[in-house]
Image (cartoon, rainbow, N blue to C red):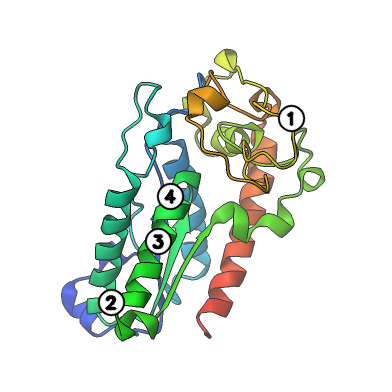
Amino acid sequence: MKFGNQCWVDVEAANKDKVVVLPLGSFEQHGHHSPLLTDTYLVTAVAEQVETELSDQIYLLPTLWLGASDHHLDLPGTVSVPNSLYTQMIKNMVRSIAMAGFQRVLLLNGHGGNVTPGTQAITELTNESDRYNEMWLALSSYWTLASPVMEAEQHDMESKQLSHACEYETSMMLYLQGELVRMDRVTASPPLVDSEYYHSEHLGRVNVAKRITTSTPTGAMGNPEAATAVKGESLLKSITQEVVAFLQEFATW
């Protein structure tokens, strides 16, 4: 159910055990070929497909398009807030949900830079008050929830994993809003370090602090030239089902 379509009296009378889902996006560069709102478009699409399947079981908030993207500011068009402010934003949004009486909140993330400050927000809340400690406050990126069904061979991907403005993101954008993707301008940079440990892509095992222009001067990684709408449709269907499965279980916690 779309939270924003309710009146306050509807919220007052609502089943407070339903999960409130807040999608987290960003407004940042995505290479020469994908729009600034790519992360927001993708997480919104996942969230809306989930809401279609679970309309009587969840409340879906509008996507927070402003993210923690300071590491992208070297490339024009990025709009960002620093981690410290992002943490405070999330804390106050969760406080508002809690004041309405809800017990479960999922921050469904679509931008890697939001993970640290978003986790900090819910951690600080649970440490500050028994009220929040008694709630279920969770954060997960859609690619983390869906990792069992995002193996490259399952979707005919040439690159091993999702990264940034990559084959995965570009494929999903081609499926959702192909008119916004400039495939004639696709160009990506190789990993700064060719190592399974390096966190230039989301499945690296070590987090390395670098601004995006150091990691990839073009602003894109991971073979976006291999992207297709068919791959994107396959990915989105699989991701949606994994998020649905989690939310159905989360509602029982």
Picture residue at 21% right of the left edge, 82% below the top:
12
Badge 3 marks a residue whose secondary structure is helix
| Rendered image quadrant of residue 226 | top right
Q: Amino acid at mark 3?
A: Gln
Q: Going 29% across and 42% down the picture, which residue do you hit?
A: 81
Give the foreground label among 2 and 4. 4
Q: Which residue is mark 3?
A: 120
Q: Which residue is mark 1?
A: 194
Mark 3 or 4: the one toward you: 3
Say what amino acid the circle numbered 4 marks: Asn
- Residue 48 visible in the picture: no
Residue 158 in the image: above or below residue 217: below
* Mark sitting earlier along the chain (1/2): 2
As measured in the structure, the alpha-carbon distance from the residue carrying label 2 to the one carrying label 4 is: 21 Å
Position of residue 244 relative to residue 150, above or below, is below
Q: Nearer the viewer, residue 57 or 246?
A: 246
Q: How many marks?
A: 4
* Image position, residue 224 (x, y; %): 64, 27
Mark 3, Cα crowd under 10 Å, few <14 / some 14-19 / many 20+, is some
User: Nearer the viewer's eye, disc 2 or disc 3?
Assistant: 3
Q: Which residue is mark 2?
A: 98
Q: CA distance from mark 1 to mark 2?
A: 45 Å
Where does residue 164 sit, x and y in percent of width and height? 56, 34
Mark positioned earlier in the residue sequence (3 or 4): 4
x and y, in percent, of residue 130 in the image: 32, 85
Find residue 114 and name its label.
Answer: 4
User: Which quarter of the picture shows residue 117?
Assistant: bottom left
Q: Which mark is residue 6?
A: none
Q: Quadrant of the N terminus?
A: bottom left
Q: Could you tell me the amino acid type at mark 1?
A: Asp
Which comes before the other along the chain, label 2 or label 4?
2
